[in-house]
Amino acid sequence: MSKITYENKFLVFDIREGPKTIIEQLNAHGQEGWELQTMLNVGDSQLVGFLTKKNTKNAPDPKASEAQKIANLWTSEPKKSKDEE
């Protein structure tokens, strides 16, 4: 079972610094998993970009854990879970 959450943040850009700066910052954040959702003009020389990052957290499966524990009791060597193989 997985739980999905989303983080949100914003970046403020000064358009006088040119598009190269904006692209570099967006690419750097993109490598960390952030996605640009929208941009808004603020005043005459600023853009605000809103970014979102999806986080997936895998919750342990209690039935599988219990079955693994019982299987380990009846074997001479503990079985490795799929994640450990």
Image: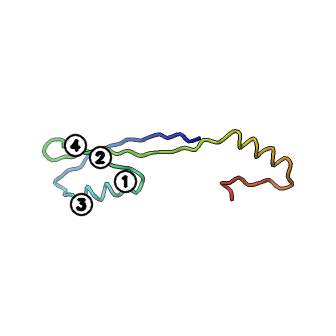
Dot 3 alpha-carbon crowd within 10 angstroms: few under 14, some 14 to 19, many 20 or more:
few
Whether tag 1 and tag 3 are in contact, CB under 8 A, the answer is no
User: Residue 20: x and y, percent?
Assistant: 23, 60
Q: Residue at x 49, y 41 (%)?
A: 4
Residue picked out by circle 4: 40
Nearer-N-terminus badge (4/3) = 3
Q: Residue 50 is drawn in which quadrant?
A: top left
Q: Secondary structure at mark 1?
A: helix
Q: Quadrant of the C terminus?
A: bottom right
Identify the residue under disc 1.
29
- N-terminal-most mark, 2 or 1: 2
Disc 2 residue type (three-letter): Leu
Check disc 3 and give the amino acid type: Lys
- Tell me the residue that label 3 is attached to: 20
Question: Could you tell me residue 10's position as x and y percent?
Answer: 31, 43
Name the residue at 29% across, 46% down. Answer: 11
Q: Which residue is mark 2?
A: 11
**As displayed, is residue 58 above or below residue 77?**
above
Q: CA distance from mark 1 to mark 4?
A: 18 Å
Whether pointer 1 and pointer 4 mark residues with C-beta atoms closer than 8 Å, the reply is no
In the rendered structure, which disc, 3 or 2, sits on the residue that comes first in sequence? 2
Q: CA distance from mark 3 to mark 2?
A: 15 Å
Q: Is residue 84 above or below residue 11?
A: below
Secondary structure of the residue carrying numbered label 2? strand
